[in-house]
Image (cartoon, rainbow, N blue to C red):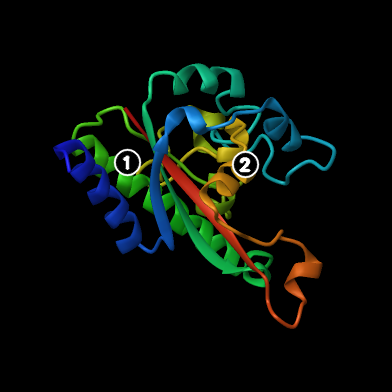
Amino acid sequence: MTPNNERMEELTELARALGATAAVIVPADVLIVEDRFAVLCAEPHRCPSYGLAPGCPPHAMPPDVFRQLLQSYHHVLVFKIDAPVAALMGPERLAIARNIHSIAAAIEQEACTLEWPLARGLATGSCKELFCPQQDGCVVLEANLACPHAALARPSLSALGVNFTLLTESLGWQFGKIEEQAASTADPAMGLMAGMVLLG
């Protein structure tokens, strides 16, 4: 195993140690980025967090810019947390999503200390909903101040246009859709939340 591969393995082990169900390294060019996922945040059923956070549309990096950014990266660490669909439809969803942000931020920080100074963590969900739910607005957007949760909050995968369904299929990660029918079956369906870290 080369030193580079050993360091990548260290990062996947860190992800699992921090609570990820699974973590793998994939080539950056396997990511499919589509504009439609960012559009879905606004329509046909506008997300309650639309426009409220720097990591969500319309303030997040547009998918076309993200596609260009990806060209400067070679690998991506992808990780997930499995959970019952019922949990992902209830209050537990927020705690799981915050954990995704925390894991992505920790891996990003560790990667920067190794040989990937431009590592970038990406997560799931709106940072406004997850870290500042009691605040009337976002201080970054409304007052141009530093984010009080910059050490944890990361941009949304959906906002950047990542087609995570195709990626999970390629990895063999099975999951049920987060919908009422899947949550109410006798044998509870499992869903997942995921994040990733771009590596140089």
Q: Mark 1 = which residue?
A: 108
Q: CA distance from mark 1 to mark 2?
A: 23 Å
Please give the name of the residue rendered at 59% of the width and 51% of the height, measured from the top-left corner: 129
Q: Is residue 26 left or right of residue 188?
A: left
- The answer to whether residue 125 of the structure is visible from this angle is no
Please give the name of the residue rendered at 68% of the width and 62% of the height, measured from the top-left corner: 176
Q: Amino acid at mark 2?
A: Leu
Please give the name of the residue rendered at 24% of the width and 35% of the height, measured from the top-left corner: 112
Above or below: residue 92 compared with residue 101: below
Dot 2 crowding, Cα within 10 Å, few <14, some 14–19, many 20+: few
Please give the name of the residue rendered at 31% of the width and 49% of the height, measured from the top-left corner: 106
Secondary structure state at the residue bearing disc 2:
helix
Q: Disc count in the image? A: 2
Q: Looking at the rendered structure, which numbered label has been put on residue 166?
A: 2
Above or below: residue 150 compared with residue 60: below
Out of 101 and 84, give the one closest to the viewer: 84
Check the picture and name the quadrant holding the N terminus.
top left
| Precedes in sequence: disc 1 or disc 2 | 1
Q: Residue 40, how many percent across, how many down?
A: 75, 36
Q: Quadrant of residue 184?
A: bottom right
Secondary structure state at the residue bearing disc 1:
helix
Q: Residue 82, how many percent across, how many down?
A: 53, 64
Dot 1 crowding, Cα within 10 Å, few <14, some 14–19, many 20+: many
Q: Quadrant of residue 192?
A: bottom right
Name the outermost residue toward the front: 1
